[in-house]
Image (cartoon, rainbow, N blue to C red):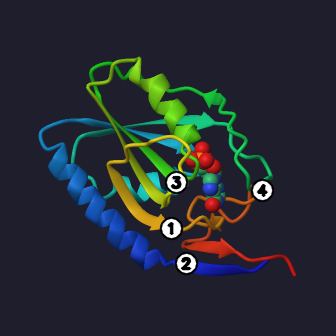
């Protein structure tokens, strides 16, 4: 399978540096809890966090994804919940990509009832204009088209997460 580079490692690094600086400014004087959505967000979480100059804690959630398909099922299942209590805390959910928005919509709802002091989203990628539910995303690194992408944490059937850049899956020949 052919992978065409879309966003380089350098572009990712520059943008995450900028977002990290912005978060440090927006939350100055506060502590934040970064919540990574496994598995895709592990890479952006690690790199973004290194650009955040604040007292920071980390937690992870795992939700069901598409399996080996590239189509969303619309069904979201929590496979691993947070270890931390989030009541009264400043929580930033870190995502790899927002496609239909169904996953995050569900996550936001289930975290909001736990009464965090604030709850925002930081995502590496946002597929523009195809969300099936309205999602308020505070930090977006890159807006992309509807194409299926891999790399930098994102997989196709479990593979390609280790690519240091984001690329578009080619058509099988
Ligand atoms: P959503 O619920 O449709 O917004 O998408 C949820 C999840 O689907 C993302 O967190 C990814 O794990 C996966 N996903 C969506 N689009 C892509 C893609 O282009 N490449 C790889 N994974 C994707
Ligand atoms: Mg994901």
In the rendered structure, which disc, 3 or 1, sits on the residue that comes first in sequence?
A: 3
SS category of the residue bearing label 2: strand
Give the alpha-carbon distance from disc 3 to disc 1, as whole Å: 12 Å
- Seen from the viewer's position, the closer of residues 168 and 13 is 168
Mark 2 and mark 1 in contact (Cβ < 8 Å)?
yes
Separation of marks 1 and 2 at Cα, in angstroms? 9 Å
Residue 83 shows in the view: no
Question: How far apart, in angstroms, are the residues tagged by discs 3 and 4?
Answer: 16 Å
N-terminal of the two: label 1 or label 2? 2
Mark nearest the camera among 4 and 1 is 1
Residue 102 as seen in the image, left or right of residue 69? left
Residue for badge 3 = 96
- For numbered disc 3, what is the local secondary structure? strand
Q: Nearer the viewer, mark 4 or mark 2?
A: 2
Query: Residue at the location (40% across, 24% down)?
Result: 112
Residue tagged by mark 2? 6
Which element type, helix, strand or loop, lies under badge 4? loop
- Sequence-wise, the earlier of marks 4 and 1 is 1
Whole-Å distance between the Cαs marked 2 and 3?
15 Å
Q: Position of residue 145 (x, y in %)?
A: 55, 68
State whether residue 107 appears in this view.
Answer: yes
* Residue, disc 4: 157
Numbered badge on residue 144: 1
- Give yes or no for contact between labels 3 and 4 (Cβ–Cβ under 8 Å): no
Q: Give the camera-side residue of 68 and 127.
A: 127
Label 3 C-beta lies within 8 Å of the nearest ligand 2 atom: yes
Query: Which quarter of the image is occupied by the N terminus?
Result: bottom right
Counting residues from the N terminus, which is met first, the one under dot 3 or under dot 4?
Answer: 3
Residue 171 in the image: state x and y as whole percent.
79, 76
SS class, disc 1? strand
- Looking at the image, is mark 1 or mark 2 nearer the viewer? 1
Q: Could you tell me which residue is drawn at 18 percent across and 43 percent down?
A: 27
């Amino acid at each position: 399978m052919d992978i065409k580079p879309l966003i380089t490692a350098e572009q990712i690094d520059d943008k995450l540096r900028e977002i990290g600086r912005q978060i440090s400014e927006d939350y100055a004087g506060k502590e934040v809890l970064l919540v990574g959505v496994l598995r895709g967000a592990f890479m952006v979480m690690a790199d973004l966090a290194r650009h955040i100059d604040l007292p920071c804690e980390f937690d992870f959630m795992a939700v069901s994804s598409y399996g080996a398909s590239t189509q969303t099922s619309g069904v979201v299942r929590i496979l691993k919940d947070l270890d931390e209590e989030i009541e009264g805390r400043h929580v930033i959910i870190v995502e790899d990509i927002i496609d239909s928005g169904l996953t995050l919509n569900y996550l936001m709802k289930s975290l909001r009832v736990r009464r965090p002091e604030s709850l925002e989203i930081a995502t590496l990628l946002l597929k523009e204009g195809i969300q099936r539910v309205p999602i308020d995303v505070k930090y977006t690194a890159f807006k992309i088209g509807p194409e299926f992408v891999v790399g930098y944490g994102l997989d196709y059937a479990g593979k390609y997460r280790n690519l240091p850049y984001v690329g578009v899956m080619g058509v099988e020949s």
